[in-house]
Image (cartoon, rainbow, N blue to C red):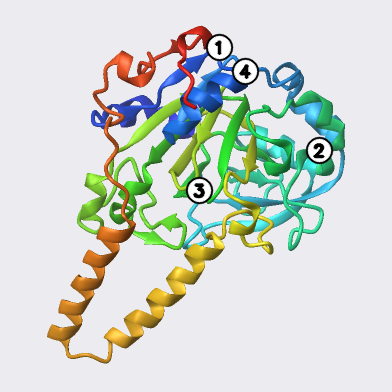
Amino acid sequence: MLCAHNCDLIAVMMQHPEKVSVPVYTAVDREIFLRAIYPRRSPAVLRGVSLGPCLDKWTVDYLREKGGDREVKVHVSPVPQMDFLRKNFLYRTLPFDVFVQRAAETKHSDFFISEEESYYLRSLGDDPRRDPADLRKQFPGLTEDFSIPEFFEPEQFFSCVFRISSCGLQLWTHYDVMDNLLAQVSGRKRVVLYSPRDAEHLYLSGDKSEVLDIDSPDLKQYPKFAKARRYECVLEPGDLLFIPALWFHNTLALQFGIGVNVFWRHLKAESYDKKDPYGNKDPVAAARAMQVLERALHALGELPPDYRDFYARRMVLRIQSCAYSPEPEVAAQGCSPTETLTASDTETSLPSSQISHQD
């Protein structure tokens, strides 16, 4: 059952006829994922992959018992639509068992802001300033319940993030610099994604979009946002969502939700900032390039306006000719089933015998 925050969700979703459904694949194993899905570098829902007994075990009572009174730092917001840029939420520390109970409630007898406040946990490492999150270390009592999909090499593993959210909670649109799998263990979750190629339409502030309300955006303030192609899926318990690095994503909990994010380094280890326990800093080379850009902009500022405009345009053309990738030959929208490895916008089974190897 949908919570009160999202009782009109169907009507809202119907307002976006231009959205592209994220393809759903079944019967996916490691070989099929690596040969037929992963190289496409686009989101995919993987259905039927074994996640372990967590799907049956992780009830509110079970989590409260296993997690106990371990203290966790959580987000508390007076409204379900969380805004990282404007910080419309508080950070508070609660015993884990108390937090789980509150997150599962729709109204609270004990609260920080209001009886309808929303809760969100993004687990942290033992030393949040240094250690990436790892479910197996922070919640050892749950380790045997969740099976990390073996879709990457063990040495590529970066973090395993435990997430719990109140019904109706919506997280801001952002991107990550590592590939990840979002495992939906309990509850249903809507995920909206945007291609990295639409970055110019998303009004970025760092790694986050300034457009908070993606369902009813203020197009007077953000006119370019209308050009961004919206990819969308609804995750059911047991689903995995492959989110390639740099793909923007926005999540909405349609029910009280429990999930796990598994991030891995798909680039060489030295590509990443070693002092980044959250895994969201730009790659080292990209950070250097941005620093050079800032120096270039400072130099352009010394020119008269007409010269500044002219040389800025030349720089943009140079970047486009040298750094932009060509448009993909097959767009995600409008492909025939055979062009998308028999993937439709609904559900597709990909037996390994039907997948040609890409050597």
Which labelled disc corresponds to residue 136? 2
The alpha-carbon separation of the residues under discs 3 and 4 comes to 34 Å
Which residue in the structure is indicated by mark 4? Answer: 49
| Amino acid on which disc 2 is placed | Arg
Q: Horizontally, is 3 left or right of 324 in the view?
A: right
Q: Secondary structure at mark 3?
A: loop
Which residue in the structure is indicated by mark 3? Answer: 79
The alpha-carbon separation of the residues under discs 1 and 2 comes to 27 Å
* Residue 236 appears anywhere in the view: no
Q: Secondary structure at mark 1?
A: loop
The alpha-carbon separation of the residues under discs 2 and 4 comes to 20 Å
Residue 301 placement: quadrant: bottom left
The alpha-carbon separation of the residues under discs 1 and 4 comes to 7 Å
| Amino acid on which disc 1 is placed | Ala
N-terminal-most mark, 2 or 4 = 4
Which residue is located at x 50 percent, y 48 percent? 79
| Amino acid on which disc 3 is placed | Val
Q: For marks 1 and 2, give the one nearer the viewer.
A: 1
